[in-house]
Every structure is written in C-alpha cells, then in structure tokens.
Image: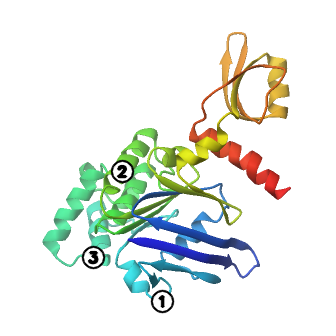
Amino acid sequence: MNISIQGLNKIYPNGHQALTDVNLDIHEGMFGLLGPNGAGKSSLMRILVTLMKPSSGEILVNGKNAAHNRGYVRGMLGYLPQDFSFFSNLKTYEFLDYAARLAGMRSKRRRSQAVDEMLESVGLFDVRSRKAGKLSGGMKRRLGIAQALINDPQIIIVDEPTTGLDPEERIRFRNLLARLSSKDVIIILSTHIVADISSTCEHMALLNRGEVAFTGSPEELLRQAQGHVWTINVTEKEYVEVNQKFQVVATVMMKDGWKVTVVGDEVKGYDAQMIQPNLEHAYVYFVEHTLKKTNL
C-alpha cells in the first residue's frame, strides 16, 4: 500500500493558493500531517479523498491516479472530515448501520455485528439507541470516528480528529488508531495538536503556508531543536523582558517568581538551564527559527 503525492498545487477561484508543489510518499502505518490552522492541511485531505480536484499535480494510490480512479480509492477509504455531519434523527446504531451500507457492507448480519463492535470500541455502546443529535460533543466526534472505521478501510484519513474530545477521549482515540496501525493500512492523521503526532506517528510532515516545510520522523524534528530549549527562573520584572526576547512555550508560577520554558538559539543574562526538547518545543522552534528566517 502506497500513496505518492507529486507536484500537487491547489489554487481556489479567488486566487488563494492553498497548496504549492506538495511532494510526499506515504506508506503503511501512521503518518502525521502537522501544521497551524490555514496551512493547507484540509485542502490536501479533501484532494486525497477525491472530494476536490487539484489545480495541477497528481496523487497515485498503489500506482493509480486517484482523480481518474475515484471508485477504486473510495472503496478502500475511511474518512473523518473536520466538520463531520450526520442525520440527527437517526439513532446512533442506525446511523452507523447506514454508514456501513454506504461503505459497501451488504450483509445485514455482518453490519449488525460490525456496528456493535465499533460502538464498543469507541465507547458508545451504552448510548446506541440515543438519537445522534442528542449525543454530547465528544460523543458525536466518536461517532464520526466510528463511521470512518466501520468497514475495515485500507486507507484511513482523519482531519483534526481530537477536536472537542476531552483528555480521556483523546487517549482512547489515539490507542484505537495505534491498534489499527499494526495492520496493513495507511492512517493519515492531520492535526494542529502536537501531542496527537508525538504519541502515535512514526513518520510526519509539517505543512506551512501550503508548502511541505519538513518531512521525516518526529525524532528527526526533535534533533533539530536539541540545544535550543531552555528553562529560565525569572522575577516578575524579568518575566516581561523574557516574553519580549524569546518565544515562550510554557510558564509555571513559583513562590519567588516564574519558571519559563523558551526556545532560542542562545540565552544570556538569565538563570537559564538547557533541557531536552519534546515535540511541541521542536515544532515551535522549527516554526519560529527555521520558517520565519526563510520567509524574511
């Protein structure tokens, strides 16, 4: 299973260029697409699932052009869009049964078993008879996840999947994806939440202003931030100065001042200690120091 994105561009009728010469190779396993809001992630997702055509370039799925073989691609696809909608008057299990039929699952017995198993997996079995419109925000998101996974797709594309989920639900979802990634499937996780990438994905790309700014493993991105993350103990007066001089990523109030985590090439004149970066630190450092310098 392989997805090859080659020279992809998307220009909207208003002239906005959402994607610029995007080139990516995606193989089996979990692939994270990280970037700020407006980076072009959703445009790329919509082209990947054949809901939108690129202005130029192509996407090959197992060597077949996705734009020319939409039925082939959709037959192996599970998709959770950022703005997921459903029939609010259907009961939860009825909606999922409907989604299974749309996915090509014709056997009623098989659908019934698959629906119950999926509702159990996403923690909705106890509310299976509740109307979808009466579910909480987090439950609705879980129902969206369930409909994307109901027919054991070979390609799973989820766009900002943990938006609206509480920490427990977010962990549940990440564990579910981790179990699925052990199969021969491609899972593309598009998000602006760094923790979703760091805990699940072996490979990733960082999209910024419609361009691929980084591609590799999370560990490779971490290495770029090595030696550039610091904690600084500051007084209240120094706290204001530090916020003006550095990109602050975390702040903790102490008895005698503040403990601030910053990213920067060098920190002088303060009680600073270099620390090991996590992926969030690395992401901020890359955006602030690599991308902004490139765009100057």
**Residue 183 location, quadrant:** bottom left
Image quadrant holding the N terminus, namely: bottom left
Q: Residue at 57% x, 37% y: name it.
A: 278
Residue 143 in the image: above or below residue 256: below
Task: Tell me, yes or no, if residue 129 can be seen here.
Answer: no
Residue 64 in the image: above or below residue 112: below
Q: CA distance from mark 1 to mark 3?
A: 24 Å
Label at residue 76: none
Question: Which residue lies under the disc numbered 2?
Answer: 178
Q: Is residue 287 left or right of residue 44?
A: right
Q: Residue at 57% x, 42% y: name it.
A: 279
Amino acid type assigned to the residue bearing label 3 in the image: Arg
Q: Is residue 10 left or right of residue 140?
A: right
Q: Secondary structure at mark 3?
A: helix
Q: Secondary structure at mark 2?
A: helix
Label at residue 68: 1
**In the rendering, at what x and y percent does residue 209 appear?**
71, 63
**In the rendering, at what x and y percent does residue 150 appear?**
29, 65
Residue 78 in the image: above or below residue 283: below
